[in-house]
Amino acid sequence: MAAKILRRGQGMLAVSLGCLLLAAVGCTGPRQWISNGFKVGPNYCPPSTPVAQGWIDADDERVIGDPVDAAAWWSNSFRDPVLNELVAEAYSQNLTLRQAGSRIMQARALRAIQIGELFPQQQTASADYSHNLTTGSGFDRHFSSWRGAFQLAWEIDFWGRYRRAVEAADADLDATMFDYGDVVVTLIADVASTYIEIRTLQKRLELVKLNVESQKQTYEITEIRFEGGESSDVDVQQAKSSYVQTAALVPQVEINLRQAQNRLCVLMGMPPENILDMLGEGDIPTVEPEIVLGIPAATLLQRPDVRRAERLVAAQSAFIGVAEADFYPRITLSGTVGRSANQFKDLFRSGSGFGSVGPSVDWNVLNYGRILNRVRFEDARFQELVYAYQQSVLNANLEAENAIVRFLKSQELLRLQLEAAEAADLTNKLITEKFVAGDQIDFNRVFGVQNTKTQQEVAAAAAKGEVAQGVVEIYRALGGGWPSPYLNTPPAVPAAPVDTPTDAEEIQVPAAELPPAAEPDLQNPLDQLEQ
């Protein structure tokens, strides 16, 4: 018996020494294998990123380099209670966000599967019975066979194949979490942008209707004067043409307004419907001329889409180790225990048991370069994702700089458009007073001034909306809104029965009250644009 045990020990020792020898000739040397925590393949190190040291417009006094607090940027920037409510509803109902929540749960399940591979991979219980008939004579030709057994096979993670797979699953889970955050950032920015567009279109519609009414009065006065012989039919037709041309802007703006409403409804996870009653009256959001941006390295690298790209690189790094493990032999411990008898009553008696246990080694020795090229493939894929990560940082820098210049220059555009609109309004008042008083004025000048007034006021409204849109784009570029304690509803996940537990609680964001929002002031249309 002792001799058998000694021979078994010698066999196991030979297998272990052989494995260490193989490790010496593989891609990963013994020293690196030990320093990696007994895992082949590279240990992950985050790649360098090409991020700017400062903003292009950092010298502008409106650009503040203090750390950015973008958790509730939409509320702090616009202080609009309607917008706050829209963001909260979209966060709880948006279907794209629910898809992202589902992907998180998928990644969790895949990670749990990979962790399960660290334990015995095969655990099988079997039982069978057969009634047999044989040919011949002199013995019982009919006999039964009863058998029950339990088999177990455990591939020892000697080279770190399964641990690297768990590393990849961990990084993939992180990537799906940041993907969820990216959807949150995009959703909040889209809701705010669409809301600003709606408010801008409402103001444009209001201004156009006022000018339509003004030009209608001019047209009616022209008709009266024509009937009294004080003007020609040409003047009447020109007045009508100018009036109808301005009136034609109304349905165009209404089309855009309805389409913006429809987009907002879909963002909130509801069928398109008329939501103007829900939105109520409101002005184009007004923002401060300054913006807090921090520094690029401290803000852009925290964007969820950038962090997702980095996590994908980490996952791919682990896959290199998984592929490299195929160079080495697979060491498996397997065993079987069971009972067998011809009669069921004898199945549990002494002598009916059987069993076996022992190691086995499987090694793909003639792989014709397949394993090496698989490692090369995974490494090339790793390099691709590194470049994709670095490109995502550059894109983030690009989006931020574009948003900054849009915000700063749109303020200058708004100032100029307001001056033009005020001048056009004053000119229209002066020429209208003279026209109503019966002064002899060239009709081309009257109608030209009225059309210019409409164009300049609409342009001023659009310029004010552009300033607000610039703020939205800045916080979109900075990844604002994630993670945020100001979203007062849990993240959207697929609906489940009340009694069915889900993983939704694990990805909830802490709830908190939104900062107070100021009530909008209702003033004259042009005065509101000047705010």
Image (tube, rainbow, N blue to C red):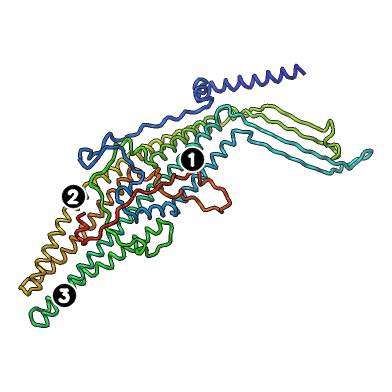
Give the left or right position of residue 280, taking residue 215 as reference.
right
- Label 2 element class: helix
In space, the residues marked 2 and 1 are separated at their CA atoms by: 45 Å
Q: Nearer the viewer, mark 2 or mark 1?
A: 2
Is residue 418 in view?
yes
How many angstroms separate mark 3 from mark 2 (CA)? 36 Å
Q: Are marks 3 and 2 in contact (CB under 8 Å)?
A: no
User: Which mark is first along the chain, 1 or 2?
Assistant: 1
The residue wearing badge 3 is 219
Dividing the picture into quadrants, the one containing residue 57 is top left
Three-letter code for the amino acid on which mark 3 is drawn:
Tyr
Above or below: residue 39 compared with residue 420 = above
The reply to whether residue 373 is in sight is no
Q: Quadrant of residue 47?
A: top left
Disc 1 marks a residue whose amino acid type is: Leu
Q: Which mark is residue 412?
A: 2
> Where is 371 relative to 187, above or below?
above
Q: Position of residue 461 (x, y in %)?
A: 23, 58
- As drawn, is 11 to the left or to the right of 497? right
Between 383 and 60, the one lying in front of the other is 60
Q: Earlier in the sequence, mark 3 or mark 1?
A: 1
Label 2 is placed on what type of residue? Glu
Q: Secondary structure at mark 3?
A: helix
Structural crowding at the residue carrying mark 1, measured as other residues with C-alpha within 10 Å and reported as few (<14), some (14–19) or many (≥20): many
- The x and y percentages for residue 280 are 33, 62
Percent of width and height locating residue 25: 53, 22
